[in-house]
Structures are given as C-alpha cells and as structure tokens.
Image: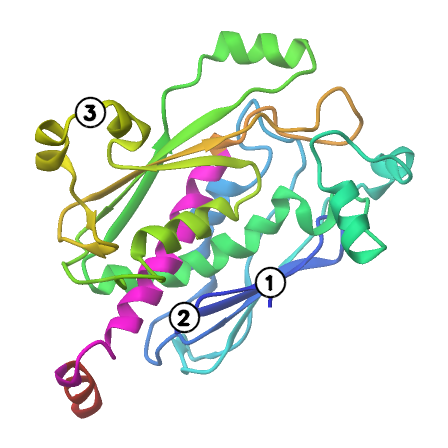
Amino acid sequence: MSNTFGNFFRVTTFGESHGKAMGCVVDGCPAGLALDPLDFEADMSRRRPGQIKFSSPRKEIDEVEILSGVFEGVTLGTPITLLVHNQDQNPQDYDDLKDVFRLGHADFTYQAKYGIRDHRGGGRASGRETVARVAAGVIAKKILAKLDISISAHVHPALDEEMLQHIINEKDSIGSSIRCQVAGLKAGMGQPVFSKLSSDLLGAIASIGGVRGVEFGQGIKAATMRGSRHNPIDKGILGGISDGNIISLQVHFKPPSSIGIGGRHDHVIAPRATVVVEAMVALVVVDHIFYSFSDTINGVIKNYKS
C-alpha cells in the first residue's frame, strides 16, 4: 500500500521516470464533477521540466489522458485513471550508473529493500513521480473550489539568479523553500489524536522527494517565543483541527542530489515543486472533509438524506 495515499479520497500512483508512462488512480471522487483533460494543463505546465532556466532540460508535454471514471465530461463516482506518457526518455544517459550507488539518492536503499532497482533516472524515486500527484491534485482542487477553499504556494524566499547561475557553473545544486497557504477551510476539519490535520499534512508533504522540513505557523521560531506572544498568533490548526483561519506552512527542500554526473537534473527543487506541495495539501484537505461526514450523527443523517 506504499503507493496509495488517503482514506476516503484515495490516490494510487504508478510508473517510473524512464518507463512508458506515469499515472494514478483516484478513488472516492464524487459523481457529477465536471472534468476535462484541459483542466490539467495549467498545473501540469507549472511542474513540467524545461520551463525555467534552472530546471531539468528534459522536454515532456505532460498531457493527461483520462482512461476511466469520466463520461461526457462528468465524473461517474467510479475510479478515475489518469495517464501521462513519457515522451523524452533518455535511459542511456544512466548506463554508466547501473552498478553505482549515487550519493544522496535512493539507489542503495531501493536495492536493499527489493533486491532490484530501476537505475534509469531513479525509477520511482525520481522527481518525475510527482507528475501523478499533480494530476490527482487537480481533481482535489476542483472539489475544494466548489467549497470556496483555495490553496496557493510560492517560492520562499526569492531565488537569486546570479547565485544560481554560479551554482550551475560549478555543477552543483542548492536548497530551497516554499510557503503554502490554505484559505477558506472552515473550523472543525481534522481528527484530534492520530489523524490530526497537521500530522497528515506533515506526512503528505514529507513524502515528496527532497523535503527536509515542514513548519506550521511560526514553525521553529515558536521554540524561542513566550506563550504570551505565541498564543495570539498561533492560528490555522489547533489540537490537530482547523480553526477557520488561514493555514500557513513552510516546506524546506535539500539541494538536489544529482550533481556533476550525467543525465538531466534540476539544480534547485522549489520552483517546480510549488504545485506538488499544493497537490498534496489539497489531497489531505479533501480527505479530511470527506472524513468529517461521519464525525457526528447529525452529519451522517444530513449527508445521507441530502
């Protein structure tokens, strides 16, 4: 089940970086949601390689094909299968790495776990796996939009292009950070103990390759603050449950591990990862909203009779 995420809104991703295709199966999407392949273009473009100066030069169209779960432009309530073909694979770029465990990569750990690994661009451990997450996130965002809930992320702080160019010239990489906000989520979403909204967000975001830290609100600064100062500004999630205020979080990425070797790689993660963070946050929020339908007997009755 390590490739499946969620409880009531479930997503299973599949595919390898240099295999035939990437994709996902979304189960739990309600019937009646308008969904068209064009809906995916904006977010897929934000994640697509080759769009910014400091990203991988790999050229992928990343068009989403809807294989199931949609009829005449509307979801059926059945599993939705989304497929994205890999069209610019260069597996030969990795031939020299077939018997090499690269520093900072999952090469050794995958080999240790499975006794076999796909060395072509890291296989499932590649950042390309996130194309399926973004596709699923588009559906989650469409559901949230119906509820007037929005999610937005941006690079934080701004990256210095001159410094980044120096990093590239040195065949090196650099770490980066993203700030993400959730607006419009009403109070009462989330579970109080082992499935807190905060802990599920943490786990979802930490599952993105390269993430090394996630902070909520004031983050680690809270460890140096007094309660009299922190309590009034500690908003968004309290006791693992949303309080109706904007939820703010910061995501920190390590420098990409692929440096000074063959293949096509990003020199910094955050610019292409903003939409990935949004997708994972959207999946968690939708899952918790669906979860909340069973929180009270009145909620069960209302949703059953509606």
Q: Quadrant of the C terminus?
A: bottom left
Amino acid at the residue labelled 1: Asn
Give the dominant element type of the magenta stretch: helix, strand or loop.
helix
Q: Which residue is mark 1?
A: 3
Q: Earlier in the sequence, mark 3 or mark 1?
A: 1
| Vertical relation: 276 (above or below) 50 | below
Q: Residue 15: where, in percent of width, then height?
A: 68, 59
Q: Which residue is labeled 3 in the image? A: 225
- Image check: 83 left or right of 298? right
C-alpha distance separating marks 3 and 1 = 39 Å
Residue 135 placement (x, y as % from top left): 49, 57
Q: Which mark is residue 9?
A: 2
Q: Indicate which label's residue lies in the foreground, 3 or 1.
A: 3
The reply to whether residue 83 is visible in this rendering is: no
Residue 159 forms part of the magenta stretch: no
Instruction: Give the amino acid type for the residue marked by disc 2 in the picture.
Output: Phe
The residue range painted magenta reads 272-298
Residue at position x 32%, y 51% in the image: 198
